[in-house]
Amino acid sequence: MATSASSCDLELKLAELKINGFATFEDLIPGEKIDRIRTAFLPLLEQVKAAGAGEKNVAVRGHSDPLLIVEGRLQVVNRYTMYVPWEQPFADPDIYENPLLLEFLDRYWGTQDYHITCYHSNNPYPGSQYQKWHRDAGISRLVPHVGLEVCPHFGVKFPLVDTAAENGSFEILPATQYLADPELEERYDEVLETGDFCTRRRLNLKKGTLWIQDPRTLHRGTPNYSTQPRPELVICYSLPWFAGGPIEMLQEEFDKLSERGKKMLSRCRIL
């Protein structure tokens, strides 16, 4: 059964985010919608891979319009990152403007004044290796030694396939989002692989799951031992003062947006 506002305890989910550093919503996106996105996405990703992208980004034209150009690169061994063009089928309001998701963010931030600031993807291919334990977006360095109560930026993620240990599911160390010790920032691998941290958690997620990650929470990608890539798309939501973007889109795509969508994407660059 699909997750809905009536069937979900949002206050409990908010508590999970605040305590664990992430929250998951199973069956929020229909499987056939995910399949359409994956069918359109993988050829773009293969272009990045075929270009032999190293430290520098390579440009890839969009799925349907040559004006849309996105970038991607090889991040570490057999693990690619790529921005996602704001076009169909990726720019789906049923996902980025999902009522349950927006109500969740409204309650967390206590406002509707936030923006969509990026759309990218994480893609371990067969033969990928462990990432280093890390945080995203540099938020932990904003105020050293102070664990901010409210996070200004979230990655809202959804895998395009079922994820498991075999294909490199995500690993996270819950409840580390308030850790703010600069002396540890460059030593997480050394510390976590030597000490006893029994709370580390594998996020084995079903296709159709949408999950929200506090980017300060320690996490890493894991090896993909399967024969296929394990793509996951990420839409970023940020408070107005947090830098990000801009997302680029065609005028016709902007014109299709709802009033709420136009507000969230008011910082976009029209091509």
Image (cartoon, rainbow, N blue to C red):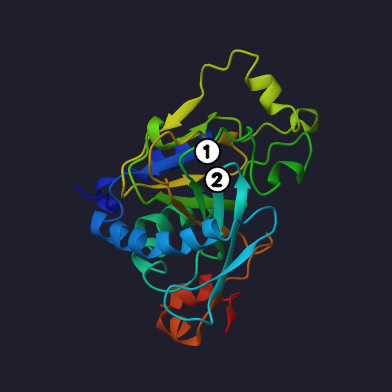
Q: Is residue 151 visible?
A: no
Q: Residue at x 51, y 24 (%)?
A: 200
Per the image, the residue denoted by label 2 is 79
Q: Quadrant of residue 9?
A: top left
Image height of 255 relative to 146, above or below: below
What's under tag 1, amino acid-wise?
Ser
Residue 29 image position (x, y, % from top left): 30, 55
> Which of 185/55 is in front?
55
What's under tag 2, amino acid-wise?
Arg
Q: Earlier in the sequence, mark 1 or mark 2?
A: 2
> Which of 186/77 is in front?
77
Per the image, the residue denoted by label 1 is 128
Find numbered disc 1 in the image and state the secondary structure of the residue it sits on.
loop
Find numbered disc 2 in the image and state the secondary structure of the residue it sits on.
strand
> Which of 126/254 is in front?
126
Image height of 212 relative to 183, above or below: below
Q: Quadrant of the C terminus?
A: bottom right
Q: Is residue 223 visible?
A: yes
Question: Left or right: 248 with respect to 259?
Answer: right
Residue 207 image position (x, y, % from top left): 31, 47
CA gap, disc 1 and disc 2: 6 Å
Q: Residue at x 58, y 75 (%)?
A: 268
Q: Are marks 1 and 2 in contact (CB under 8 Å)?
A: yes
Q: How many residues crowd mark 2 within 10 Å: few (<14), some (14–19), many (20+)? A: many
Question: Left or right: 121 with respect to 179?
Answer: left
